[in-house]
Amino acid sequence: MEQTTKQFRKRNAILACLRGTDVHPSADWVYAQLKPEYPDISLGTVYRNLALFKQQGTIVSLGTVNGVERFDGNTEPHVHFICTKCDSVIDLPQIYVPQSLCSRAAAETGGQVNTCHLTFTGVCRWCHPNENQ
Amino acid sequence: MEQTTKQFRKRNAILACLRGTDVHPSADWVYAQLKPEYPDISLGTVYRNLALFKQQGTIVSLGTVNGVERFDGNTEPHVHFICTKCDSVIDLPQIYVPQSLCSRAAAETGGQVNTCHLTFTGVCRWCHPNENQ
DNA sequence: CGTGTAAATGATAACTATTCTCAAATAGGA
DNA sequence: TCCTATTTGAGAATAGTTATCATTTACACG
């Protein structure tokens, strides 16, 4: 447990940053977040480690929102809402994709199904003109 | 109907190309597809018109697959499967997202829900090693 | 038939997110 | 303290997409 001393300080900070937020950040957001505490951190390091975590399955990619990739430290499958005005990504934790859909998808593709993403887009309550609260 | 004579020949060809395929193409694919018949077509024109159609709602964007945006001429909501090996996008026409999920999403966000995308990823039957047929 | 005007297009430059390169720094074991 | 493998920073390179601008085109009007 003393293993996490120095070698991976920045790497660990990147992972902690992802796990400590629910904004589903981009690489740039993580970079900006860590910059004050690690003034010499490089954007390349953020990209590198995000790619590593993604490949390990430690984090998950939500795909791109408005051209930039967004990540999620919560690897449990869950549903997302994307606001097309402010590009925020919000969890909808009370909505589940029925398991039956996944098994039917596997049957219908005839291949192998690994992930399942249900995503709604629209205008969030803070961007919506008629509901500013 | 003589309106479709010359002014929008390329524009119409782009739309027809999208509507006449089920590969959920990228801008580059459309460009390559039209190049033989329209040797002087420009990639910029393809991008421009795809953006126009998307804004009009004539076509729909599936988001990016491996960094490139993919489009669908079928604007009816339906479910997709993306193969992470060959990047093909396949319709799963027999699977529907329960309407109840959409209304619950609208309720839960407190905003306005416009679209709903259910996407599975995995390995398609042609890329899957144990099922090469 | 000409002419004028607005829209569409081609060529290419510009932009942006991301990846790659490589030398320097670092960690941790011998 | 030295050695080796890994991580990192800085910046170059890449790829997809968008913006620019002069040219072309369609079509309405005379």
Image (cartoon, coloured by chain):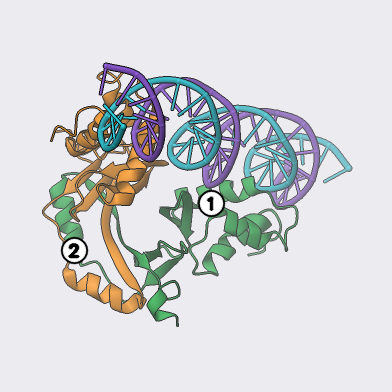
Chain colours: A green, B orange, C purple, D cyan
Q: Position of residue D26 (x, y in %)?
A: 27, 29
> Of discs 1 and 2, which sits in the foreground?
2
User: Above or below — where is A132 with respect to B7?
Assistant: below
Q: Position of residue B27 (x, y in %)?
A: 35, 35
- Letter of the chain that mark 2 sits on in the rendering: B
Residue A65's tag is none
Question: Distance between the Cα atoms at labels 1 and 2?
Answer: 31 Å
User: Above or below — where is B20 with respect to C12?
Assistant: below
Q: Which residue is mark 1?
A: A50
Residue in the image at 47% along x and 57% along y: A71
Q: Residue furthest bottom?
A: A133
Amino acid type at circle 1 is Leu
Residue in the image at 23% along x and 34% along y: B12
Instruction: Determine the secondary structure under disc 2.
Output: loop
- Letter of the chain that mark 1 sits on in the rendering: A
Residue B102 figure quarter? bottom left
Q: Which residue is mark 2?
A: B97
Instruction: Determine the secondary structure under disc 1.
Output: helix
Q: Position of residue A3 (x, y in %)?
A: 65, 59
Quadrant in which the N terminus of chain A appears: bottom right
Seen from the viewer's position, the closer of residues B22 and B59 is B59
Residue in the image at 19% along x and 32% along y: B4
Residue in the image at 45% along x and 75% along y: A126
User: Above or below — where is A5 with respect to D20?
Assistant: below
Q: Are the numbered discs 1 and 2 placed on the same chain, yes or no?
A: no
Q: Residue furthest left?
A: B94
Q: How dense is the environment of label 2, judged by Cα within 10 Å: few (below 14), some, or many (20 and up)?
A: some
Q: Is residue A63 visible?
A: yes
